[in-house]
């Protein structure tokens, strides 16, 4: 019986180490992209103003009390949008926390922000990647 406890504790230590070094399931363990700002106002989110850039994918969501709500995205298939089509028309409301994950020129990026009640966009840059 004692040998069983030693083996099971070793397994627990190995599993805990794997989770610690690779990350827990969820966004911290997934490549969600490099941090890159976007242009935000009350009517749209613009990923680039450079006509040579191609927007390949985008996802805009609302994070409200820890619950994510998808507001819009590019769908299941890649898109190939250049300026001015890299600006997505969407009505954002002050006092909310938003995020976007997108692919520009084939590179994954992310941006998280709050729009305060006076329409200031405040970046929520995190120390990841």
Image (cartoon, helix red, strand yellow):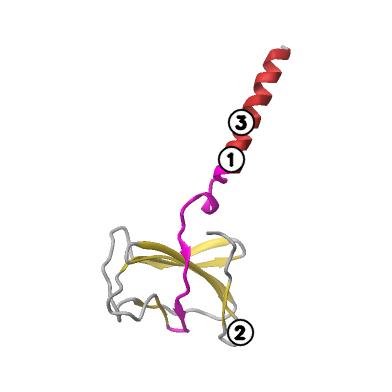
Q: Nearer the viewer, mark 2 or mark 1?
A: 1
Q: Are marks 3 and 2 in contact (CB under 8 Å)?
A: no
Identify the residue under disc 2.
Answer: 117
The span from disc 2 to disc 1 (Cα, nearest Å) is: 40 Å
Of the residues under marks 2 and 1, which one precedes in the sequence? 1
Q: Nearer the viewer, mark 3 or mark 2?
A: 3
Q: Are marks 1 and 3 in contact (CB under 8 Å)?
A: no
Q: Give the percent coordinates (x, y) of residue 101.
A: 44, 64
Compared with residue 43, is residue 74 higher up or lower down, i.e. above or below? above
The magenta span reads: 21-43
Task: Give me the residue at 61% from left, 31% from top.
Answer: 14
Compared with residue 26, is residue 49 higher up or lower down, i.e. above or below? below
Crowding at mark 2 (Cα within 10 Å: few <14, some 14-19, many 20+): few
Of the residues under marks 1 and 3, which one precedes in the sequence? 3
Q: Give the percent coordinates (x, y) of residue 72.
A: 40, 68
The span from disc 1 to disc 3 (Cα, nearest Å) is: 9 Å
Q: Main secondary structure of the magenta part?
A: loop
Q: Is residue 122 magenta?
A: no
Identify the residue under disc 3.
Answer: 14
Q: Nearer the viewer, residue 51 or 98?
A: 51
Compared with residue 80, is residue 94 higher up or lower down, i.e. above or below? below
Identify the residue under disc 1.
Answer: 19
Can you name the residue that lies furthest to the bottom here?
Answer: 118
Of the residues under marks 3 and 2, which one precedes in the sequence? 3
Task: Give me the residue at 40% from left, 65% from top.
Answer: 102
Can you name the residue that lies furthest to the top here?
Answer: 1
- Relative to 58, 27 lies left or right: right
Task: Give me the residue at 48% from left, 51% from top.
Answer: 30
Q: Quadrant of residue 45?
A: bottom left
Q: Give the percent coordinates (x, y) of residue 98.
A: 52, 71
The span from disc 3 to disc 2 (Cα, nearest Å) is: 48 Å
């Amino acid at each position: 019986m004692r040998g069983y406890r030693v083996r099971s504790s070793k397994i627990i230590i190995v599993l805990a180490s794997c989770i610690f070094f690779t990350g827990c399931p969820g966004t911290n363990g997934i490549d969600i992209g490099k941090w890159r700002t976007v242009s935000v106002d009350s009517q749209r989110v613009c990923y680039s103003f450079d006509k040579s850039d191609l927007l390949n994918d985008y996802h805009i969501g609302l994070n409200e009390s820890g619950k994510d709500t998808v507001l819009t995205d590019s769908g299941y298939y890649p898109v190939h949008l250049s300026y001015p089509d890299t600006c997505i028309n969407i009505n954002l409301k002050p006092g909310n926390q938003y995020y976007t994950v997108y692919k520009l020129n084939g590179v994954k990026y992310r941006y998280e922000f709050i729009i305060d009640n006076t329409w200031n966009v405040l970046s929520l840059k995190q120390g990841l990647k």
